[in-house]
Image (tube, helix red, strand yellow):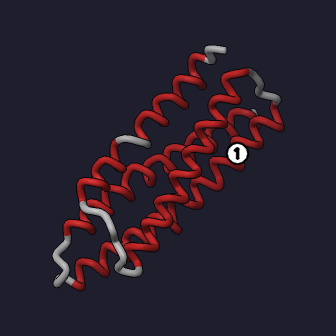
Amino acid sequence: MAYAIVKTLHIVFMVTWFAGLFYLPRLFVYHAMADAGDRIGIERFKLMERKLYFGITTPAAVLTIAFGLWLWLGFGIAGGWLHAKLALVLVLIALQVYLGVLLRDFAQDRNRHGHVFYRWLNEIPALPLLVAIVWLVVAKPF
């Protein structure tokens, strides 16, 4: 029973974390496209980005990692696939930190990239990582 509850909570927070990782770069796209004279719109993007990163995405990441560790240490999940999954989770954490750096740049009006960069950032890293992690967990290939 406890395993099912912990696993469910882990999945809920993981989905929330991934939603934030997908949506934050999309906000960056819109923010980069905003007219420099639209101070109200730019401040609104800064507020949305900050709330998403610090209020939703980061807590979900921390709770995902905590519940994942609980599952691993408390219930003895093992296998070679787990090492590959953990390596991919480290890449996700690095992506989270990088998005935080970009967020800080936007907050200080130091954006150095155009909207196309953020479009690529929105699509390329998160989707293959999500697919690879889910495949490793479901298929357990090794």
Residue 62, above or below 78: below
Q: Does dot 1 land on a helix, a strand or a loop?
A: helix
Place of residue 1 in the rendered image (x, y in percent of width and height, measured from the top left): 75, 33
In the picture provided, is 80 more to the left or to the right than 36?
A: right
Q: Quadrant of the C terminus?
A: top right
Place of residue 54 in the rendered image (x, y in percent of width and height, measured from the top left): 52, 68
- Amino acid at pointer 1: Phe
Residue pictured at 61% horizontal, 14% vertical: 141
Q: Kindly indicate the quadrant of the structure image that contains residue 124.
A: top left
**CA neighbours of label 1 inside 10 A, class few (<14), some (14 to 19), many (20+):** many
Residue 113, above or below 81: below
Residue 28, above or below 70: below
Place of residue 15 in the rendered image (x, y in percent of width and height, measured from the top left): 50, 44
The residue positioned farthest toward the front in the image shown: 112
Q: Which residue has dot 1 on it?
A: 67
Residue 48, above or below 16: below
In the picture provided, is 95 more to the left or to the right than 85?
A: left
Q: Exactly how many numbered labels are in the figure?
A: 1
Residue pictured at 64% horizontal, 29% vertical: 84
